Amino acid sequence: TNLTTGSVVHPAHPAFYMMMAEADARNLPVILQHNACSESTKPYKYGFEYICELEDTLQKYPDVKVLWVDAGMYARGQWAGYKEQLDRMLSENENLHITITADVLKLQKISPKELCEICEKYPKQVMCGSSTLGIFNKANVYNKDWAVIKEWASSLSKETFQKVTFQNAFDFYAVSTKKKKDFKVDHGSFENKLMHSGTNAIIRTKSDKLHDKEMAAKKDAAPPPQKHRSLEGMTDGKLLHNAEIQHVTIDAHLHMLDFLHKSSGTRKILQAMDGCGVEKAILIGMPCCKKWSKDEPEQPLYYQDDNGQCYFYAYSDQMVADAWMALEDSQRKRFAPIMAAFNPTDISAISHVERMWDKYPGLWRGLGEIMCRHDDLTTMLQDDETPVINHVAMRPIYEFCIAKDINCLVHHNADRTAQAEDDGVHEYLWEVKEVLDHFPDLKLIWCHAGASRRTHEPNHYEMIDNMVTTYPNLHIDMSWVVWEECVLDPATGKPNKGWVDVFNKHPTRFSIGSDQVGQFITPAGGNLLKPEITKYWCLSE
């Protein structure tokens, strides 16, 4: 935990209580890695300051079986008297189970003999496990781990040996039926801070003080406004008549998932596409997930909703693959799935790409949206390292795209994020140029033309004109705020002539996209995708 940013993770955290409550409802066990004490070896540090958090959790959820990996022991810390503490915890908490691993036996924070004594005293609460991580065939490490465990376990009585090495784990992971019990949400008084308060922690998804829920329910039920009314004329991606749908388009930037990895689902997405003339779409997940911080009064929905951090969430790509695989062939052909749920500063990120590519051969049509420089999101990432388009970790990603002949969609600001700036200089443009100079065969799609909120110059279209003229494999994605922030003339509400001239000069180098995120159809049937597509129709004029 000393190497992570943000809130310290601990068992009695409100978020962990939510997971424990879910485990209780589903009658599932919980496996926990939690240090019993801090790393300090200073003489003024003594005792086991973190076990109270675990005990609070065990006592709050006595029906949930918890397996404490390594019994809280690890390489650092001070361990005098720990056997007595562990003895007491097992005695007072029947739902607590511990693992004796090869690492525990090697560390000897509690001697092997003392561990045998604990097993004989609590024969139903101890199990064994290896310390092997991922690689099982290197230097015979897995077999060596079990040789250490078996040598130690041979000192146990025959009955205890059978329980500790087999039966306890068998019983712990046995299939259980869901409890017949209702778990009601706590509707107590609102607290502005979700600070840790032990067993009295209160969780609110939405604050009653910040929202008029009755008014929100009425708004959800009201008929959708005209801009969200779906248009008639398209069914299953086929245009039947053009009475309302003036143009059939491809949405080159559609996020199936939002920043909490929720979604209306592909059925609603297809409904929304039909309702605004979108025949096909590039199907993107969401590489970043928004953390719900204990310091915020309610759960955020978008990365800018509060000051909580964001983190890269690799399962996003799996969710996209699952959704596409679940479709009928006639629906699959309307989507081109792409992936990018990896950290652009991790040199090992290419391993994730290769795994997903090999797992679903023929499914992926490109990589993206890779999140590099991205206005406020950049400073909200849990990493201390800024993701940039020319990062060394991106080199194998570009090489992969070239080898597979696929597109690479990257979000990377061309300019600094500033409230007001008019110096005509795009400070981060050189980073994009460096990539295109080093990888001339890369099919790079520059998301949002390198613009974000408060991240562009008045001469942005001139810069884009120069870039597509210089680099023949560069393609420009005109989705999201670039339309409102850069392209539209605020005085007329129509596209700026400078941009129109660039579009006419390079007609094959631009694509439009909604950048709609996660939600597509409102409870009353409103089409959230429609205004993000039909706004481009004026280009035909």
Image (cartoon, grey):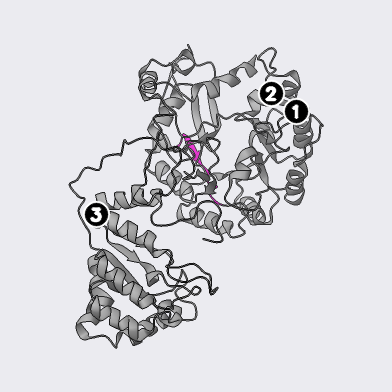
Q: Closer to the camera, 24 or 476?
A: 24
Q: Do the numbered discs 1 and 2 sit on residues whose CB atoms are within 8 Å?
A: yes
What is the crowding at mark 3: few (fewer than 14 residues within 10 Å), some, or many (at least 20)?
some
Question: What residue is disc 2 on?
Answer: 487
Q: Earlier in the sequence, mark 3 or mark 1?
A: 3
Instruction: Give the CA separation, mark 3 to mark 1.
Output: 59 Å
Instruction: Give the CA separation, mark 2 to mark 3.
Output: 55 Å
Q: Residue 393, position in %: x, y?
A: 65, 56
Q: Earlier in the sequence, mark 1 or mark 2?
A: 1
Q: What residue type is labelled 2?
A: Val
Q: In which quarter of the image is residue 3?
A: bottom right
Q: Earlier in the sequence, mark 2 or mark 3?
A: 3
Q: In which quadrant of the rendered image does the C terminus lie?
A: top right
Q: Residue at x 73, y 44 (%)?
A: 432
Q: Residue 27 carries which label?
A: 3
Q: Which residue is drawn at 74% across and 18% down?
A: 497
Q: Residue at x 29, y 88 (%)?
A: 155
Going by the image, does 41 lie left or right of 402? left
Q: Do the numbered discs 3 and 1 sit on residues whose CB atoms are within 8 Å?
A: no
Going by the image, does 332 lie left or right of 5? left
Residue 481 vertical position relative to residue 433 in the rendered view, above or below: above
Q: Residue 120, position in %: x, y?
A: 24, 81
Q: Which amino acid does label 1 sit on?
A: Tyr
Question: What residue is disc 1 on?
Answer: 461
Element type at mark 2:
helix
| Outermost residue toward the front in this view | 44
Q: Read off the magenta span.
A: 333-342
Q: Which amino acid does label 3 sit on?
A: Asn
> Looking at the image, how many numbered discs can be counted on the residues?
3
Labels 3, 1: front one: 3
